[in-house]
Amino acid sequence: GQNIDQPTEMTATEGAIVQINCTYQTSGFNGLFWYQQHAGEAPTFLSYNVLDGLEEKGRFSSFLSRSKGYSYLLLKELQMKDSASYLCAVRDSNYQLIWGAGTKLIIKP
Amino acid sequence: NAGVTQTPKFQVLKTGQSMTLQCAQDMNHEYMSWYRQDPGMGLRLIHYSVGAGITDQGEVPNGYNVSRSTTEDFPLRLLSAAPSQTSVYFCASSPRPYRVNTGELFFGEGSRLTVL
């Protein structure tokens, strides 16, 4: 079966750095997405990786290793507004998205 | 820019009732989809469409119908509501992912449905 694993919850301190991991086992691979979802709101797109390596976008970076079935989202200089759930999703060989259950990130002052 | 618009935002139904969740997008996206989101679970695909007149089932289609008569609209119909359909529903669209773009999804604000 297809599976996406990510930690259920993480806690970090304002101003610090946090890494959210995502491991996947899917039928084929056509890209990996990270989305941010604030409580009670819709998911919004953060990043996309299809090749191995690091993609940097401001305070957020996303890394992919296809051989290991592994990705992480790195958030730097954490702000209180970064408190949200972070969803990892993989597009499989049929171009359908397989979603992880999400990681709830709690930022403390 | 309206983006993806879903209505209603909240709805309470009794078991056995039917209803339609509306979804409209103004970005001329070919691909539209419906997801449900339940606590502790990833988003699950209900139905999707790659263009007007074309629909297909996702992971959890039972109890739901869809149609795509225009590029803009993709309504989701609950035929006979059951308590197991209590969930938050999201409509999402994207440029067709098979072409040279990331195929990122643009989500509506969500519809919170409670079935008693």
Image (cartoon, rainbow, N blue to C red):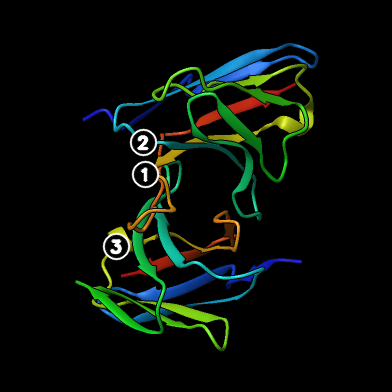
Label 3 and label 2: CA atoms lie apart by 34 Å
Q: Which residue is mark 2?
A: B29
- Disc 3 versus disc 2: nearer the observer: 2
Query: Which residue of the protein is positioned furthest toward the bottom in this rendering?
Result: A67
> Tag 3's secondary structure?
helix
Q: Position of residue A34 (x, y in %)?
A: 42, 64
> Tag 2's secondary structure?
loop
Task: Say what amino acid the circle numbered 1 marks.
Answer: Pro
Q: Which residue is mark 1?
A: B95
Nearest the viewer among A56 and B58 is B58
Left or right placement of residue B26 versus residue A65 in this view: left
Q: The numbered mark 3 sits on a residue in which chain?
A: A
Task: Say what amino acid the circle numbered 2 marks.
Answer: His
Nearest the viewer among B103 and A105 is B103
Label 1 and label 2: CA atoms lie apart by 5 Å
Residue at point 29% right, 58% down? A81
Q: The numbered mark 2 sits on a residue in which chain?
A: B
Q: Position of residue B13 (x, y in %)?
A: 68, 16
Residue at point 66% right, 25% down? B114
Q: Which residue is mark 3?
A: A80
Left or right placement of residue A76 versus residue A2 in this view: left
The reply to whether discs 1 and 2 touch (Cβ–Cβ < 8 Å) is yes
Nearest the viewer among A95 and B83 is A95
Of the 4 image quadrants, the one containing the N terminus of chain B is: top left
Asked if badges 1 and 3 are on one and the same chain, I answer no
> Tag 1's secondary structure?
loop
Reading the chain from its start, which is encountered first: label 1 or label 2?
Answer: 2
Task: Say what amino acid the circle numbered 3 marks.
Answer: Met
- Disc 1 versus disc 3: nearer the observer: 1
Nearest the viewer among A39 and A54 is A54
Q: The numbered mark 1 sits on a residue in which chain?
A: B
**In this view, B2 is above or below B8:** below
